[in-house]
């Protein structure tokens, strides 16, 4: 029978460093969701393009990224980019790797949203003299955004959780704080519990924010 006692007070002196780690995780995640959303739009449009080469390239990108472990991709970016002569920080490498990975999933989310819009709406908008860009911006995208809103929130949570791997390339995020604090106190279990609770709290807050914002954005007029 184990006689291990949880002593959380040993972690308390290190909690002052946790807010900076949380901000780093949030900043990393926000940059990733924004950049991957742009990639998702381009990828979804490419997958619906009339040009076979674009469809093939987009499909290959999605399949490669979805079948490559994020940790492997992170190492490829972190150690591969310097081979080209460019010097990038661990934070930038993490943003690039997470964006490439999340962009593939975002492509499929947006493609699903586009497929849900009847073809007749495109034709009707074009027949009214709208350009393709105007049709996408004013007719298609508002409807697509409503469809993909929930999956988008779920993807943001997945990005936050995936960002925990950034510590392997020297990013001072929550996981890095957990490792440093565990090494300093030798109370690894307590430190892991605290870090886990922080991730749970962050994800719950993101989900709550998604629900509240969704009600405000998509509420029906009375």
Image (tube, rainbow, N blue to C red):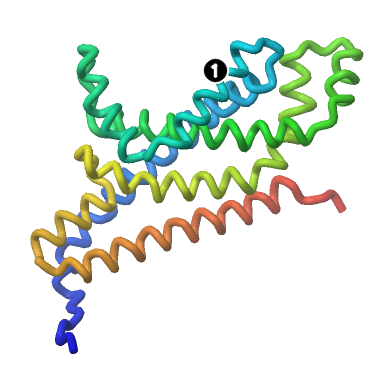
| Residue 37 in picture, x, y percent from top left | 54, 31
Displayed quadrant of residue 133? top right
Of 18 and 152, nearer the camera is 152
| Residue 60 in picture, x, y percent from top left | 52, 23
Residue density around tag 1, few if under 14, some if 14–19, many if 20 or more, within 10 Å: few
Q: Would residue 31 be seen by someone viewing this image from the given angle?
A: no
Displayed quadrant of residue 128? top right
Tell me if residue 47 comes above or below residue 192 in the rendering: above
Displayed quadrant of residue 48? top right
Residue at point 19% right, 39% down? 170
Instruction: Give the residue at the far bottom of this rendering.
Output: 1
Q: Would residue 39 be seen by someone viewing this image from the given angle?
A: yes
| Residue 162 in picture, x, y percent from top left | 39, 46
Residue at point 62% right, 18% down? 55
Residue carrying label 1: 57
Residue at point 15% right, 54% down? 180
Of 23 and 126, nearer the camera is 126
| Residue 131 in picture, x, y percent from top left | 78, 11
In the image, taking residue 51 as reference, residue 138 lies left or right, namely right
């Amino acid at each position: 029978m184990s006689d291990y006692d949880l002593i959380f007070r040993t972690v308390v002196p290190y909690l002052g460093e946790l807010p900076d780690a949380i901000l780093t995780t949030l900043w990393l995640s926000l940059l990733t969701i924004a950049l991957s959303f742009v990639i998702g739009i381009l990828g979804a449009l490419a997958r619906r393009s009339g040009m076979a080469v674009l469809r093939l390239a987009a499909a290959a990108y999605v399949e490669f990224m979805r079948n490559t472990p994020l940790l492997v991709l992170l190492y490829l970016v972190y150690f591969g980019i310097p081979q080209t002569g460019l010097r990038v920080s661990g934070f930038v490498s993490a943003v690039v790797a997470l964006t490439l990975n999340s962009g593939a999933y975002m492509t499929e989310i947006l493609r699903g949203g586009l497929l849900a819009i009847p073809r007749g709406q495109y034709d009707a908008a074009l027949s009214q003299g709208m350009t393709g860009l105007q049709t996408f911006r004013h007719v298609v995208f508002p409807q697509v955004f409503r469809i993909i809103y929930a999956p988008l929130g779920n993807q943001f949570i997945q990005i936050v959780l995936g960002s925990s791997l950034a510590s392997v390339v020297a990013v001072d995020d929550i996981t890095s704080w957990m490792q440093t604090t565990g090494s300093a106190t030798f109370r690894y279990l307590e430190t892991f519990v605290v870090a886990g609770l922080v991730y749970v709290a962050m994800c719950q807050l993101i989900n709550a924010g998604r629900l509240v914002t969704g009600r405000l954005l998509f509420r029906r007029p009375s």
